[in-house]
Amino acid sequence: MRHSIILLLLAVAVSFTVRADAYGYLRFVQADGTETALAADGLKITFDTEGVASVTHADGTATFGLDALKSLVFSDDGENVTPGVEPVTYKKGDVNADGEVTSADLAIVVNILAGLDDAANYEGRADVNGDNDVTAADIAAIVNILAGIDGEE
């Protein structure tokens, strides 16, 4: 899961690089609803192998556990999320990013393992169990989600 989140964060950062200049803050929204807005000017984000993002900003350093990070959103000020900018989030197991975990997601992982598809096409979402590798364990994780055994949404 950490690998997926790291790739997602990198993809978001790259896709918003041009747009970031128009916004003064980057808001970190955690799964528990906690939000932290940090000035975007001079912001530097690094990731460690334990799934923690260290964010260096004008006032010091903040850390965020990637497992608890729900989204990153650019905002005009430290308080209001910019209208029209939707955070990019995916359900665990939603490999094709269509908003649902279905047998289509399972088929993608099977195809990756069979060498018929490339995990890089799915921005880390194929690593469902978060062990930084796409294996049969990811198939089992999707099967558990489909069977209702895994309660994550």
Image (cartoon, rainbow, N blue to C red):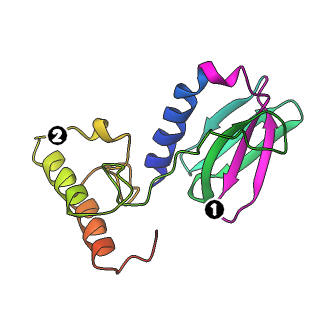
Residue 151 percent across, percent down from the top left: 44, 77
- For residue 92, side relative to residue 87 (left or right): left
Residue 22 percent across, percent down from the top left: 73, 22
Q: Within the image, what quadrant is residue 18 found in? A: top right
**Category of crowding for the residue at label 2, using alpha-carbon neighbours closer than 10 angstroms: few (below 14), some (14–19), many (at least 20):** some
Residue 38 percent across, percent down from the top left: 80, 38
Residue type at the position of mark 1: Ala
Q: Could you tell me which residue is drawn at 10 percent across and 41 percent down? A: 116
- Above or below for 102 versus 56: below
Q: Within the image, what quadrant is residue 13 found in? A: top right
Q: Which mark is residue 117?
A: 2
Could you tell me which secondary element the residue under label 1 belongs to? loop
Which span is picked out in magenta?
18-41
Report the residue that reaches farthest toward the front.
Answer: 84
Closer to the camera in the image, 53 or 68: 68
> Which of the marked residues, 1 or 2, is nearer the chain's N terminus?
1
Residue that mark 1 sits on: 31
Q: Quadrant of the N terminus?
A: bottom left
